[in-house]
Amino acid sequence: MRRFLVAGNWKMNTNRASGEALAGALAAAAPSPEDGVEVLVCPPFPYLACIGDKVSGSAVAVGAQDVYFEPEGAFTGEVAVNMLKDVGCQFVLIGHSERRHVLGETDEIINKKVKAGIAGGLQVVLCVGELLSDREAGQTESVLDTQMAGALADISAEDAKDLVIAYEPVWAIGTGVTASPEQAESAHEYLRKWIANRYDSSFSEQIRILYGGSVKADNAEVLMGQTNVDGALVGGASLKPELFIPIIDAARKLASA
Ligand code: PGA
């Protein structure tokens, strides 16, 4: 049985005070581990430590939004896996569409980051997803093939055992346009089959595949209720407790059903 993961990607939002207030509210409301739901928040780098303190002892885990693949050295502006671990991070997002399309990250860079994250003991949330033009051209699956094969090159099933995939159609991110439950399920089913082909089917049954792209309280339950959807990666609606807690509650309800 796959456990739901509800993750908040704060992107370049919040400040120390607003982030701590948000984290405090989530820690107070977060489900217990027996509820079958894990909660993750991914604040900006400067706040990882203070948000980690705020959620310490609660069921909320902390992750970074990115990481660099080198262990240390002359890489101005970059942050290494061990630094994230040192401040209490358990997870890291890799290959978010904004990293790919705004910051120019390639599948090759993403592959190096995934390898570094796994080698360092972080749980990697690998983000994949097609542009609207890809979908309109009927290229969704081939884009997913390329992104998955690129990101997971030379990574064994054993290495990937804690991997989480996030399917985030780029046209649904921050736009208020959500993939329909059928569109989400179809992509998730495709990704699960892809993993079964690349690795094996028992591994693909264990791996969690989150949906991301304009997840809100009013669509979370139907999206996460799809057979192959194991949680959500939430941007805008993760920035306010009154928007994010109902999404956690939707997962909790589905987990107990
Ligand atoms: P959104 O962002 O929920 O604001 O669409 C999702 C994401 O980018 O992870």
Image (cartoon, rainbow, N blue to C red):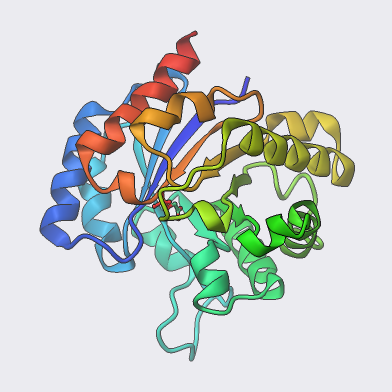
The x and y percentages for residue 81 are 50, 65
Quarter occupied by the N terminus: top right
In the image as oriented, which residue stretches furthest toward the right? 197
Q: Nearer the viewer, residue 192 or 81?
A: 192
Looking at the picture, does residue 185 appear above or below residue 1?
Answer: below
Looking at the image, residue 24 sits to the left or right of residue 151; the answer is left
Looking at the picture, does residue 252 appear above or below residue 205?
Answer: above
The x and y percentages for residue 51 are 24, 52
Q: Nearer the viewer, residue 224 or 222?
A: 222
Q: Nearer the viewer, residue 25 or 157?
A: 25
Residue drawn 19% across and 53% down?
19
**Residue 109 picture quarter:** bottom right
Looking at the picture, does residue 220 appear above or below residue 91?
Answer: above
Residue 115 seen in the figure: yes
Looking at the image, residue 114 sits to the left or right of residue 16; the answer is right
Residue drawn 37% across and 29% down?
218
Count of number-bearing discs: 0
The x and y percentages for residue 67 are 49, 68
Residue drawn 56% across and 42% down?
179
